[in-house]
Amino acid sequence: MTDAPAPVGSGTGQGDGTDPVPRLSQAEFIALTAMLFATIAFSIDAMLPAFPEIARELTPADPNRAQLILTSFVLGMGAGTFLAGPISDALGRKRVILGGAALYITGAALAWAASSLELVLAARVIQGLGAAGPRVVSLAMVRDLYSGRQMARIVSFAMMVFTLVPAIAPLMGAFIIAGFGWRGIFGAFILFSVVSAAWLWLRQPETHPPAARRPMRAGPMRAAAAEVLTNRLILTAIAVQTLGFGALFGTLSSTQQIFDATFGRAASFPVWFALIAVVSGTGSLLNAAIVVRLGMRAVVRATLAVQCVLAALFAMLTYGGLWPDGTYFAGYIAWTTCVFFTAGLTFGNLNALAMEPVGHIAGMASSLVGSLATVGAVFIAAPIGLAFDGTPAPLAIGVAVCGGLGYLLMRTIPREGAVPRPPRQGDGTENPR
């Protein structure tokens, strides 16, 4: 395993081996990648403050239907995730990202002009399909240029938006609604996508040259999918990422309810949540500083162990009524911050681990890893959220279980540089490819 950037012309980097293409500076590449990553978070969370106005205008008889604006976007995004990566393996990264941006902009424009909720929902599906391109293919683009710990470091910086944007986007959405109404949010989506697409088009060279592309034929695609889904290292990374997303999404889905029902602080929720996100976003900075020295596996294992212990301790203190007077809310804020903080120390590393063996089919791998982990997480997060009993304890138990299982799975992955051992049938020590 190499920890250096993939060499130009190697089949995992730029160029065809004879005419290397200059790269962006690392700082600009990270900033561009982060903006592409942010497309989905901005598209979901900026809509949250618009629900009341949308319900009053488009579905006054059934206000709950306004929530379908989020699920319709996720539906389109899920479908697009399976397609965007393989298409980019065949056609190149820039074409697919730019094509996805065009589809996203079209969907946003249609939603802005829609006169009924049904038309808005259809437009949001189109928008979700388009958003899958920038999100999925940008990760493949990172893998084209970097590998190993350096890839983990790049992704760690870019993944900071995973915790920052969801907190900032609702405040931005509320500001836009105050000035332009709820339809103005779709104008902001268009502007955001135009800026990120123009930046990519004008500045970023193609990272997947024609010589490295794979045709979009059923046979090669099945072979690529089989290569990903039979690699034990990749499957383990997907499983751990699924558990991590499940814990994170469960926390996201429960947090507002806990602020309201448990602590009576619904009005101040956006401010507290923004503070949590800003502090927890430093997890990615910490990971970028330590991952090259310590390694991806060690960082993820230690993080999940700490997450499991802290969540179990929080649940015990809550169920036992052991919080000293005046410390319950402060303890909850600190623990929730830790949950989000762990995202910066795990997801970038797990993505890098999963992508490391499959740089030659990075698009297909990125699609499968992203879609399987996200869809699987829904089946973990939903029961965690539904278990809410007026306290954060069920959530803490769910997070502890996810962290513990993830830690045990990570222990089955040998450390980097370990001497391979002969596999022993049935004892779980067979080495990944």
Image: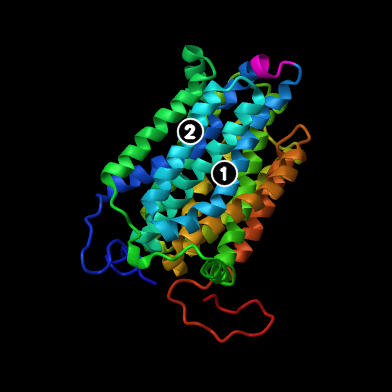
- Quadrant position of residue 15: bottom left
Rendered position, 263 above or below 91: above
Residue 60 image point, x, y percent? 72, 15
> What distance separates the C-alpha of mark 1 from that of mark 2?
15 Å
Residue 43, position as x, y percentages in the image = 52, 33
Q: Identify the residue under disc 2.
A: 106
SS at mark 1 in the image: helix
Residue 133 x/y as whole percent: 47, 47
Q: Residue at x 56, y 27 (%)?
A: 47
**Front position among marks 1 and 2:** 2
Q: Is residue 193 left or right of residue 86?
A: left
Residue 414 part of the magenta segment? no
From the image, tell me which residue sits under label 1: 77
Cβ atoms at labels 1 and 2 below 8 Å apart: no
Where does the magenta region start and end?
A: 55-60
Element carrying mark 2: helix
User: Does the magenta portion include 57?
Assistant: yes
